[in-house]
Image (tube, helix red, strand yellow):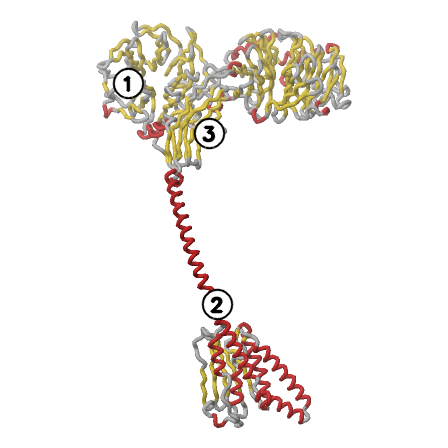
Amino acid sequence: MRIVSLLFVLLVCIHLNAQERATRSFTTKNGLLSNDVSALHVDTKGRLWIGSKAGLAVQISNEFRQDSISIRYKFNNITSITEDADTNLWIASYGQGVLYRNKKESKLFTISNGLVSNRARKIKIFKDCVYVATNNGVSIISLLDKTIKNPKFKKSADYPFEVTDFFEYQDKVYATTINNGVYEVTISELVQVSDVKRILSAFKTQDALYLGTEEKLLQFDVLKDSVLGSYLIPYVWEGTIARDEILSVSSGLYSNEGGLYSLKGNENKLVVSKEVQISFNDLSSLVYDDDRDLLYLGTKSNGLLQVEWNSKIKKYRNFGKVYTSFVLHGKNFIVSEKGLSILKGEELITSVPLETFKKFQVKKQSLFKDIPTRSNHFYEIEYTTEASKIVFYKAVVEKNKIWLASNVGIFKMESEGELESYFPIHTYQFTFFQGKLIETNPYGGVRIYDDIERMKYRYFSETSSVDIPRDVVSIDQDAESVYFASALDGLYQYKNGNFKSFLSSGDFNEAKLQKVVIANSSTVLVATDFNDIYRLTFSESKANVDLAIPHKKIKGTSIDFFKIYEGKLYVATNWGVNVFGEQEYYFINQEQGLDYSVIHDGSFHSNELYLSALEGFFKIDLSIFEKKEMKLKPFVYGFKVNTIPWETEEVLKVFSKPTLPIELSYSENNLQLYFDVLRVKYPNKLEYYYRLKSDEAWINLPETGRLDLQYLQPGNYSVELKIVDLYASQNNTYLMATLIVKPPFYMSIPFIIGMVIMLFFIIFTIFKRRIHLLKIRQQRDREFEQLKMKEERKQLIFDRRYAEMRLQALQSQMDSHFIFNILTSLQYHIMGDHKKEALNHLDRFAKFIRFTLEFSSKKAVSLQEELTYLERYVAIEKLRSDRDILFIIENKDEICLDFTSITPMLLQPFVENSILYAFPPRITQPKIQIQIYQLSDCIEVVIRDNGVGIDNTKERVNWHKPKGIDLVKERISIIQNNLNREIEVNSSNVGTSVHIYLSTTIS
């Protein structure tokens, strides 16, 4: 067993001190321009500039943007980036010379304007000069007038004069080369001071100068031309200082060796594959951001790395899955899938592997094996479980003894790690209360062991009472009570020997719980399955419940651990760690290096939080949860008005002074404001809010870096941006712009005054016009009344004349000869003993007389009614004259006679004249024919007979002047005065035809 323990200690000790720093990797998949990063620079504004074969890019927050100026020049193969005192950037390219750029101007320096070579390796700024290292010497560019000087040097016929780097020492500039040694650089010439060759890089600390060569890293004294020390680190391409450490990057030209090296004093160490979490050795560049304590590493083919160098979160993966951890007597106890490890600081002093636990279980399991059975309501143990399958659930320290619950039972251990006892109890949740062990059965029931060493207990079955806990997932206790959180049945309490269910009593109605924590003697915090945290405050009579923290304020979907420590509530979820203070809120996650998926347990000690996770063991310095100064600097770099962008120079100029108002017309009210926030260490911890007026509520900004202001109403706006930093627990408000949206011309004061005056004038004009119109209307009304009276008089005259005409028409039908002849005919039939026929004729005559009287009283009848009347009239005439007259009616154009109006008895006079005067005795077959035609503007009625004609009047018997024709003409002229056609009468020896033209409308 000692051999196994020793091997376990050795295996863990190999990597114990290699705790991992928080590291993030960026590649082209994350937006990086290229995976070969050859040059890095952090400018005075906190922006990271990245040079590669693909060109120049800048990182702001989590976003990478390609530099527009370098795109314009098609500038790539970048080897060096630096910045002068006026914040102008100087960029070197191996093949395209040197690019100078700022906000307003840019210039490219090449062979064509004086550069010694276009293959530039390095740039250094010293005083008023820019020193350019090329493959063919040095060029010096003046910062004042941009002129170029090329110092002379002694050339070799065997190899080029390749300059690799510069360093400054005692107010002088020196250049390093591949083949020629070290040179002092003056304006006129290069003076050799050392013949150390194959130098790739040079960097200085406050006390020393370092030269990176193909074989070693040298500490060098340039004045004495001597090597003060050397380190077996080949191919060092670049170096820098990070706090108190000298860092350098190395990668072999011909072998897969290299990494990130840290030097402290005379010690050198490789820290690439463990602390920095990288598995490749092709590092080529680095830069340290002192302001944010971030180290950036460039690689030849694996993108960009960001390392939090002084991270307050330490991660240990060498333990594997960690179940729980705690501190006892100043030592860290870590219970993992490998067993128990005991640490003193960073040193592993003792370990107990799983095999040791298994052997001890086998040795002791027979002692109480008959007690924990299913019949005794125990959660059974699989005693044949292999050592590698042992899983630990929970650790409790009681009277300096360590109690470990596992799937093979509970182990009791000394504080030094020696196993003391074993108890065949399978439980997930247990505790010690008033010196007695209390353990829960996962399916229900609780045991209180009065003597655990002899397995003497009292069992409380969940079936005996609703107050007995079941499905317990969390336990916490103080001196007076034990609280049980159930996954399905709410909160339970054990106090004064009695159990109580808060769900059954109605004191607390939440059933699905995750955790329970005692805050103080009178307050308990409970986390539900839905991530709401409730506070239960106990008084003498009842528990007062309130929602302490709603789930919306907790980032995460499940709570793995929560505890109160030093007045703050720590809530670890599957997303990260939430910390709630009195007026503070913090949140950390994988962005700070806390990259776990599941937290098993947590504990506090000496201002540190220990988290046991599936991925290992985390140690968090609690000073990370202290308020920090916010050094953020938001600025506007883009502005669009109605989707039309402003020029970049104009934007930077206008928005550099946000208090100066920007005046916009009323139609320029759809704005997009693009902004960046500089010096951001953790971009994902920032939340953005904005408002347009100081008395308005803050509005969450859904899209980082863009502010959309749509349909702004005329008025004055102060656009403010509030940035909430969840890492620093701070929030700051920044004025981004002052906007004035002018009202439209129709809302300006002069226009409104003018409109009021115009409106008054219009109202006055309308009023005056109205009075005038009223007078005209009154005059017209008077004239109309007079005209109406005249028309009424005319109507009376017309009605009188019309009545006379109707009477005349009636008289024309009812003249004495007509009636006399009818009565004579009736007398003839009666005397001739034709009484039946006489009665029949008398009935027809009576109906005709009545129909005539009714017909004559109407002003208008249908043409069909007029024709029906004529048929009856002809029938009576046949009776009177005792002659068979053929009477025919023809509707030639299928006119709807029922809907054509006509004056009553208008056609009768013409039919009567034909009967009376057209048929002398020689006309044996008299015929009267009425034909109706539809013309374009009227209806034509033609009455034809086959009589002798008008000219043969001598042949007529009992001749009389034709009746009714003049009357008909007059009636047509009065009633149908819109028809201008006259009645046409055509006569010949074969008959007479009368053409009457009727309007379809009767006036």
Q: Secondary structure at mark 3?
A: strand
Determine whether 932 is above or below 437 in the image: below
Residue 338 visible at all: no
Provide the residue designation for mark 1: 130
Report the disc number at residue 789.
2
Q: Nearer the viewer, residue 7 or 784?
A: 784
Q: Nearer the viewer, residue 627 or 96?
A: 627
Image side of residue 321 versus residue 981, left or right: right
Query: Mark 2, residues whose alpha carbon is within 10 Å: few (<14), some, or many (≥20)?
Result: few
Q: Nearer the viewer, residue 207 or 608?
A: 608
Image side of residue 400 versus residue 14, left or right: right
x, y percent for residue 413: 65, 9
Dot 2 amino acid type: Met
x, y percent for residue 88: 32, 22
Report the disc number at residue 649.
none
Q: Quadrant of residue 465?
A: top right
Q: Secondary structure at mark 2?
A: helix
Q: CA distance from mark 3 to mark 1?
A: 46 Å
Query: Mark 3, residues whose alpha carbon is within 10 Å: few (<14), some, or many (≥20)?
Result: some
Residue at 67 percent across and 24 percent down: it is 487
Determine whether 949 is above or below 66 in the image: below
Q: Secondary structure at mark 1?
A: strand
Residue at 53 percent across and 84 percent down: it is 911
Provide the residue designation for mark 3: 691
Which numbered disc, 3 or 1, marks the residue closer to the eye?
Answer: 3
Dot 3 amino acid type: Arg
CB of mark 2 within 8 Å of CB of mark 1?
no
- N-term-proximal mark, 2 vs 1: 1
- N-term-proximal mark, 3 vs 1: 1
Dot 1 amino acid type: Val
Determine whether 36 is above or below 221 in the image: below
